[in-house]
Image: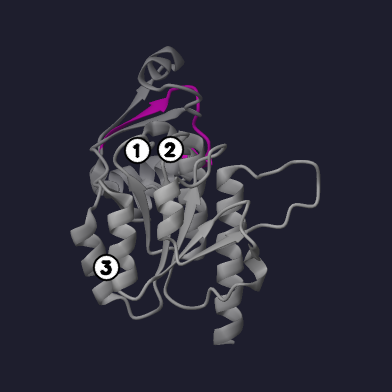
Amino acid sequence: MHTVLALLKTDARQIQELRLLRSRNDRRVQKIQSLADAQDIPWAWASRAELDQLVDGNHQGVAALCTSTEVADETYLDRLLANLDQHALLLVLDEITDPHNLGACLRTADAVGVHALITTRDRSAGITPVVRKVASGAADSVPFVVVTNLVRTLERLKKAGIWVIGTDGAAEEVLYDTDMTGPLALVIGAEGKGLRRLTRETCDRLVKLPMHGVVSSLNVSVAAGVCLYEIDRQRACVSA
């Protein structure tokens, strides 16, 4: 429900038509109807069985038929960096395959103002209905950049003056002791295997999160959230 509302408010052009559960007519459904009518988006009532056929998972009484989400490439990235009037903040995911983790990373990226999320074309999750739902609208607000060669892209960012910092549980430097106030690309590796060797070697610095319990690592999206909010905190302190 929240995902459809967010899309209606941010990029309704992607929605071709809507289906709403016939037995549900609460305030949020009425809000969806109102936004759809205002933008000439067709909608119709549907039974639960019809919605179950349209949607994989819990649909909460609404389904939107959308056009494909546009993905960007290195050329878009160059234009983005050239037009920024503030220090760049990029989130780079190294072969993250779990759509729930990708959706959660997009949601946090939107919350802290990440300028773009970069991921690999192969062995990585793309924008799917599950990602859209978990992202709660962020799949359409955060530019999604897909690259063929991540190491080459990181080198390109470094030449553009972007500081590339990777997360690694074996790193000597702790996140909180690292200056993250300048132009920055934060690189997060896949859960379990972490950053690939070449990706790790391409980073300017490697940092870790302090772990005081018995577990050795955090979920990918949780680690990304902690790191991004530490970056946000440091930047807020500098600008205050």
Q: Could you say where residue 133 lies in the image, as x and y percent from the top left?
A: 46, 37
Q: Is residue 172 left or right of residue 104?
A: right
Evaluate if marks 1 and 2 touch, with contact meaning CB atoms under 8 Å apart: yes
- State the residue position of label 3: 80
- Name the kind of residue labelled 2 in the image: Val
Could you say which is closer to the camera, residue 13 or residue 25?
13
Q: Nearer the viewer, mark 3 or mark 2?
A: 3
Res 131 label: 2
- Secondary structure beneath dot 1 equals loop
| Residues rendered magenta in the picture | 16-29
Residue found at the very far top of the displayed protein? 49
Kind of residue sitting beneath label 3: Leu
Relative to 39, residue 183 above or below:
below
Specify the quadrant of the image occupied by residue 76: bottom left
Could you tell which of marks 3 and 2 lies nearer the N-terminus? 3
Q: Residues under labels 3 and 2: Cα distance?
A: 24 Å
Mark 1 sits on what residue? 126
Q: Residue furthest left?
A: 75
Q: Secondary structure at mark 3?
A: helix
SS of the residue at dot 2?
A: helix
Residue 114, compared with residue 88, is above or below; it is: above
In the rendered structure, which amino acid carries the disc numbered 1?
Answer: Gly
Q: Residue at x 44, y 61 (%)?
A: 203
Q: CA distance from mark 1 to mark 2?
A: 8 Å
Mark toward the start of the polypeptide (1 vs 2): 1
Left or right side of 4 for 233:
right
